[in-house]
Amino acid sequence: MSLLRAVARRVAAGLVVLWAAATAAYLALLAAPGNTVDSIVGDGADTPQIRAQIVTEWGLDRPPVVQYLDYLWRLAGGDLGRSYLLQRPVAEVIGEQLAPTATLAVAAAGLGVLLAVVVAVGTTGRRRRWPRRVSSAAELLLVSTPPFLIGIVLLSVLSFRYGLFPVAGDQGPAALVLPTLTLALPIAGLLAQVLRDGLDRALDEPFVLTARARGVRERAVLLRHALRHALLPTVTLAGWLFGVLLGGAVVVEQVFGRPGLGQVTLSAVTSKDMPVVLAVVTLSAAVYVLVNTAADLTCLLVDPRLRRS
Amino acid sequence: MGPLLAVEDLHVTFDTPSGPVAAVRGIDLTVGVGECVAIVGESGSGKSVTARALVGLAGVDARVRAGRLDLAGRDVRAYRPRDWRRVRGRLAGLVVQDALVSLDPLRTVGAEIGEVLAAHDIVGRRERAGRVTHLLDQVHVPEPARRARQYPHQLSGGLRQRALIASAIAGEPVLLVADEPTTALDVTVQAQVLRLLAERRAAGVGLLLISHDLAVVAQVADRVLVMRDGRIVEEGPTGRLLQAPQHPYTRQLLAAVPSASSRGRRLSEPARVRDGCAVPALARTPLPARPAVRPDDTVLDAVGLTRRYGPHTVVRDVSFSVARGETLGLVGESGSGKSTVARLVAGLLAADAGTVTFESTRWSGVPERARRPLRRRLQLISQDPLGSFDPRYTVGRLVAENLDPGPDRTERVVALLRRVGLGPDLLDRHPRSLSGGQRQRVAIARAVAPRPSLIICDEPVSALDVRVQAQVLDLLADLRAADGTALLFISHDLGVVHHLADRVLVLHDGAVVEQGPVGDVFSYPRHDHTRSLLDALPTLVTAG
Amino acid sequence: MTVTLGPTPTAGAAVPLATDPSTPAGRRRTRPRPGLLVAGAYLVLLVVAAVLPALLAPGDPLAADPRATLAAPDPAHWFGTDQLGRDVWTRVVHGAGHSLTIGLAATGIAVTGGVLLGLLAGLAHRFADETLSRSFDALSAFPLLLLALLFITVTGPGTASLLVAIGIATLPHHARVVRGQTLLVRRAGYVEQAVSFGLSRPRLVWRHVLPNVLGPVPVLAVIGLGEAVLAAAGLSFLGLGPQPPSPEWGAMLSEGRNYLQVAWWMTVLPGAAVTATVVALTVVGRHWQARFDGRRP
């Protein structure tokens, strides 16, 4: 029962954060200098009809509390509003660009995690000094380099110089390789650092000594005991990972000329298409909360100690 | 048949950035079939390193060298990691301290025990669960099948330690190395674990017991080796060693153990006598005379103290009083509510019911402002002195903080440090760079600085080695005699309380089950719990 | 959602600030490390470049030389020239001031706000703490870049909105660490002990809580600065920061991208400046942090 209560508590906390995030986004709209209608119109066509439409849709002629509640209500119903610049519902705009970004994000996350685990497991322990130093340095370099620079360097060497991969576009799996790598490398760098740190700590724990005293193989000690402990703090980074993927997608899609959510966002920002920006931001917060709650629940499953009341 | 374990001239050296450090410097050791050999020593003596080296786990930075190192008749000196794996768990099992951290908290107890069976292919996958249950049963874990499915944190300390022993004996090793197997356990649980180890020995297993506690060792060991600074200073059959110790260090160790028989005398040699020159420890130096306790003059009065945490009542209806100059002992096992009582009395925690009166002033249920004028009359010494020091402060500043400001404050600090046996050279040092004993002395100096009428000592010596503990207890006795300070002395160690206290309060599940003069309570216990505590207490039968 | 005080990720925060008692400090003796020296020297150079750029590059970062456009690095132009014939070295040196100012200002906002709100949450009673902590959670639910984008959409691009955006986006991280640290210190044995010295609450907070909470803040700030510089470069690469011809590193990268095939130095060398800055800050910050952790019991 304590497990059920723990799950319920985390889900409730997630909902609260979600509500707060939606409110924050709404406040950002209100805080925009000038008329709210102007903010929503952005750089789009500004006619009395459109303005009237905005006033009706956002309920701007009603009291602020009603406006706010109405906004929450629409959001809860999945209505992301309408872009007056593109003259289309925002959900549609986002929906059709979701697939390429999702593909990119999933591929990059998978590759990043895989690389991190392999590197961290391969370089932990105190016996191997040199591989560890080299990989530490590489990780620091990757984490400290702007992702777009990694992309640009990869692009100029592998695509321009050797022509191994297409320069731009999203045609075929070959076009996915460089963007994925660009996005995955910094992630792998940071995760490997966190993971190795966790492994080192776990290997210093007394239960590792006991496991070794049982005659368990070193590889089993590492994988069966230490890795689980090291993965726990890494799992809590899932929410952050999602943020990096989404933020990274904006940059990477720009560098590689790929269509996707990032491009939509960026052009919405430059043309001040507030409804689209708001929707993307709110949506990303929602997914962040979802991912984070899932990560918390995973920890709850893996670590029985957290299930205590 | 030869001995199970034969070691000659064992050296263990650690490579550190500041050069090699010798932890073990040439020790000899044998353990026969069904024999229990104990290594006793203080922290840093090299006893744990020895234990680990014997199973090939001294560490990556360690270099192990020996004239002879035979395990079950096999020379293991040239063993590679792969060979060691076959030894560990199968020929030699290791039991270490504190099973909460020594069993993987993310795995069930059954999985941990089963790991040995899998690593050495002892039984097939299908029979493993049954064998695990059997093993848990063998170490007297009730409901073994259910316990096997639980996680370490769901088991009590005693059950965990038994599960750890089960995992160590799962591979049926001929030798069991137990490194402080009962430290941090309550006395009653400790007695059970010791009985269990004795059972294994009776079954023919050789037992190498590592401990800091002579009394524990005396219960089970056939032979005792006393280790200091990486060397064995004395060894012999348990009875002989305890009755007629030859080496001055062994004598010091024995004399330092507080107990009923040590009442009224010093536990440590006076500071001016250098180690090992003479044997004044056995000369029974008496403690200084104290001002008489005035039972009618009450310093502290606690009535009906109760404290709840959620649904748990951790302290229920505790009443007692402390007279001026009196030392009141408060004993109980872990979780009995001792520390909560201390915090309630100290006014650091609000009671749900009951009142505390200190120096005839209402102490509980009033705002902190009302307590503040009298705060310095009541001081606190905790088990962890380092945690009670602001990490940024030097020794001098720490002590000075509890003194009224004035031009001569530094002199007063130096005088206080002298009183607790520390030199003025420590003024600018950080407590981190001090030894455990020195830290506790600084804490004591700070506590006595405002001349309090009562000092609450919460397990002040339990983290210290026995000789350091002896010095600190002597110091407390000296200060008590000089200042007439009353002490509320909280400890899990009945010996310490018996040594120091005038009256004693026995706490069990948050309630006082027995109280009275120390001699009466400990000689003629009326309550079952007190009786079981005393029965479980390992006692040293020493000369005189 | 649980608030994880552990490694909320920044470029350098792989090691959590909370002290781990299982690794005694005495075991890790600090030896002189060449990496630390190089990083320190680079940072000194960087500060010189930011304060007195003329000392390192006497030229004008905006001076175009139409005769020498897109020239490869040579003794006359160490870092080559760009499409207008401007000296890239001079522009990188003069850009240090821009990038560092943005980074420092953003970190300043984040640290100041984070410390104040974190302290408030850590010292406040349960309800206020809960409200503040949930607000930090909500704010950090927005990915850094998207929060910055939202902010810039509202205020329009430019240096000011860039640095405020980064400051606000990284604020919750600092606030959480400070809150956690405050709770840790509040419950520490020495604070409880200080009550028995008869200290009043304000004096207790002033003398024991504040110094021990604020101690690690500079370390946090150094590591945060690296993160801010990185984020600023990303945003101005997207054209949302200082506008050309200003010699800001991110903006230079953005410009150089169009000439990648003919003049790699226009992109790679300002990029290397960003990377080296972040690496140096991280190395120094981590070293400082390790010393700091070793200092605490």
Image (cartoon, coloured by chain):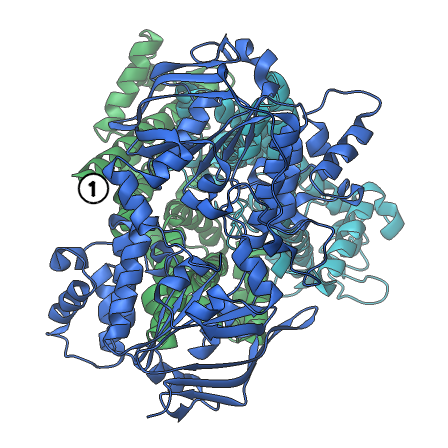
Chain colours: A green, B blue, C cyan
Q: Position of residue C218 (x, y in %)?
A: 66, 39
SS class, disc 1: helix
Q: Quadrant of residue B446?
A: top right
Q: Is residue A3 left or right of residue A20?
A: left
Residue displayed at 51% across by 50% down: C20
Residue denoted by label 1: A3
Q: Quadrant of the N terminus of chain B?
A: bottom left
Q: Position of residue C101 (x, y in %)?
A: 71, 38
The chain carrying label 1 is: A
| Kind of residue at badge 1 | Leu
Residue displayed at 31% across by 51% down: B536
Decide which of B537, A100 is in the foreground and name it. B537
Compared with B66, B398 (above or below) is above
Compared with C85, B129 (above or below) is below
Crowd band around label 1 with a 10 angstrom C-alpha radius: few (<14), some (14–19), many (20+): some
Residue B361 makes an appearance in the image:
yes
Compared with B64, B474 (above or below) is above
Residue C211 makes an appearance in the image:
no
Decide which of A256, B64 is in the foreground and name it. B64
